[in-house]
Image (tube, rainbow, N blue to C red):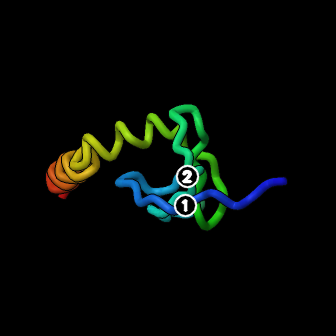
Amino acid sequence: MMPDTSEEIRLPKACPSCGSHLYRVNQVRNPTDEVHCASCKHYLCDYHEAVDMLEKGSGDEAEELIEKVVNRRHH
Ligand SMILES: [Zn+2]
């Protein structure tokens, strides 16, 4: 028996394969459970890594700001 116990979570990191921010994870949420993209099933990371990502939160935004600064220097 394989009951569907997965649920969707939203992560700041976009799927490297399709760019989606929605992922599926087992409802039990074991730290070693795999987190997969909700649309293309691409494996992203383990659940404990996803939790790290959520706790850092604005990490991606800071990176985006750095990218913008770098782009500005090129123009
Ligand atoms: Zn994907």
Report the side of 58 relative to 2 (left or right): left
Q: Quadrant of residue 10?
A: bottom left
| Three-letter amino acid code of the residue under disc 2 | Gln
Task: Give the SS element for disc 1.
Answer: strand
Disc on res. 47: none
Taking the image in four quarters, ligand 1 sits in the one at bottom right
Which of the two residues, 2 or 43, is positioned nearer the viewer here?
2
Respond yes or no on whether mark 1 lies under 8 Å from ligand 1: no
Measure the alpha-carbon separation of dots 1 and 2: 6 Å
According to the image, label 2 marks what residue? 27
Q: Residues within 10 Å of mark 1 (few under 14, many from 20)?
A: few
x, y (%) of residue 70?
20, 48
- Residue beneath the point at 43% across and 42% down: 50
Which of the two residues, 62 or 39, is positioned nearer the viewer here?
39
Residue 2 visible in this rendered orientation of the protein = yes
x, y (%) of residue 17?
59, 56
Q: Earlier in the sequence, mark 1 or mark 2?
A: 1
- Residue beneath the point at 51% across and 56% down: 15
According to the image, label 1 marks what residue? 7
Which quarter of the figure is the C terminus placed in? bottom left
| Three-letter amino acid code of the residue under disc 1 | Glu
Report the side of 6 relative to 22 (left or right): right
Q: Residues within 10 Å of mark 2 (few under 14, many from 20)?
A: few
Q: Quadrant of residue 45?
A: top right
**Do callouts 1 and 2 mark residues in contact (Cβ within 8 Å)?**
yes
x, y (%) of residue 44?
55, 45
x, y (%) of residue 58?
21, 49
Residue 70 visible in this rendered orientation of the protein = no
Task: Give the SS element for disc 2.
Answer: loop
